[in-house]
Image: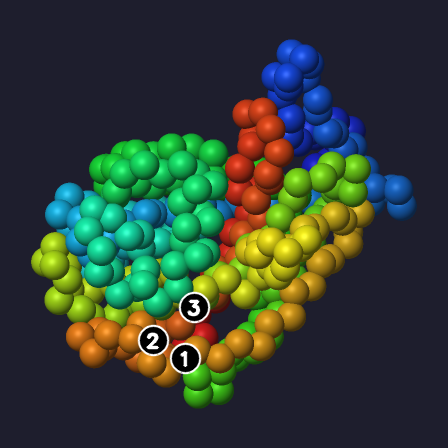
């Protein structure tokens, strides 16, 4: 839902605080744009990034409870969150090797694991900058605390699937001028739902499984998985994608899956310093079927 501000107030993004010299740096934007129109404030959705593994015993009960929160047929369905709760599940390489979802594409997962300094599984992060630890009840509590936070970002995803190919674009619009603040990044991830696999830990159904990033590229010889964004008020950044799913994913005959269960998740994350370092300001998801 979007809300227009009808009184002259100063709405602030507190992006950087308590820097190396103890100073506070605040990026602010008036609610009025240069043409006199009111800036628009959007309600943010929730991104929760879960690090898990098919070889992790404690991951099974927590994933199972989380799935029940997301299941409309469950007695504990979190209906108040509905489509506002967006999940990404990264499969890691411990406590034992052999997770097929990790083995297929390890480098992006290694990058995100290092970014958060995960340390153990299961381990959830809410909107990037909230460590939600390892229990599903805490994950649900933190999701409810994070829903509908105000943001100047809107994300629109337009896309279609043709066989194993997905194509379209992701558009990020900012109703405020953020051009003077560096550190905003767009991530675009492909996920898969409802794959089946009899895992060592007993889990058999896997949803929101990370497959790959469509954002990013090589900068100074280093692979990055994001696109930097810098926008004036009312401006839009467009990320075009055209990507084909390998029909051999995840290279394990024990995994059954359908190409009809592909999804796209796009989110804007701030990478800087202070209390909002790593904060996700907006997220959106798109199911292709």
Residue 47 x/y as whole percent: 44, 47
Say what secondary structure mark 3 lies in. Answer: strand
x%, y% of residue 53?
24, 53
Is residue 194 shown above or below 35?
A: below
| Residue on which disc 2 sits | 249
Q: Is 48 situated left or right of 182 in this image?
A: left
Residue beneath disc 1: 246
Decide if residue 72 is in sight here.
yes
Residue 144, visible in the rendered structure? no
Quick one: label 2, few (<14), some, or many (20+) residues within 10 Å?
some
> Residue 30: x, y in percent?
78, 32
Q: Residue at x 79, y 37 (%)?
A: 180
Residue at 64% across / 56% down in the picture? Answer: 221
| Left/right of residue 62 with respect to residue 112 in the rendered view | left
Give above or below for 252 relative to 33.
Answer: below
Residue furthest out toward the bottom: 163
**Residue of label 3:** 263
Q: Nearer the viewer, residue 224 or 184?
A: 224
Q: Residues within 10 Å of mark 1 (few under 14, many from 20)?
A: few
Q: Earlier in the sequence, mark 1 or mark 3?
A: 1
Residue 24 in picture, x, y percent from top left: 68, 17
* Callout 1 touching callout 2 (CB < 8 Å): yes
Cα gap from disc 1 to disc 2, whole angstroms: 6 Å
Label 1 secondary element: loop
Q: Residue at x 60, y 72 (%)?
A: 241
Q: Is residue 44 above or below residue 100?
A: above
């Amino acid at each position: 839902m979007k809300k227009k501000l009808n009184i002259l107030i100063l709405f602030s993004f507190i992006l950087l605080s308590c820097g190396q010299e103890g100073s506070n740096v605040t990026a602010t934007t008036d609610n009025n744009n240069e043409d006199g129109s009111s800036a628009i404030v959007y309600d943010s959705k929730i991104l929760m990034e879960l690090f898990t593994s098919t070889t992790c015993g404690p991951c099974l009960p927590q994933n199972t409870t989380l799935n029940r929160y997301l299941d409309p047929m469950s007695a504990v369905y979190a209906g108040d969150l509905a489509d506002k709760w967006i999940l990404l599940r990264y499969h890691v390489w411990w406590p034992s090797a052999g997770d097929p979802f990790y083995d297929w594409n390890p480098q992006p997962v290694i990058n995100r694991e290092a970014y958060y300094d995960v340390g153990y599984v299961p381990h959830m992060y809410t909107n990037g900058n909230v460590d939600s630890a390892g229990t599903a009840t805490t994950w649900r509590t933190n999701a409810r605390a994070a829903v509908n936070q105000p943001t100047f970002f809107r994300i629109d995803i337009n896309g279609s699937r043709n066989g194993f190919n997905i194509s379209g674009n992701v558009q990020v619009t900012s109703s405020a001028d953020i051009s003077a603040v560096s550190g905003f990044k767009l991530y675009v991830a492909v996920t898969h739902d409802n794959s089946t696999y009899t895992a060592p830990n007993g889990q058999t159904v896997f949803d929101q499984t990370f497959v790959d990033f469509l954002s990013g590229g090589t900068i100074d010889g280093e692979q990055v998985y994001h696109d930097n964004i810098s926008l004036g008020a009312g401006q839009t950044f467009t990320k075009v994608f055209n990507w084909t799913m390998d029909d051999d994913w995840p290279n394990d005959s024990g995994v059954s899956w359908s190409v009809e269960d592909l999804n796209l998740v796009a989110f804007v994350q701030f990478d800087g310093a202070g209390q909002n370092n790593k904060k996700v300001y907006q997220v959106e998801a798109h199911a292709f079927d």
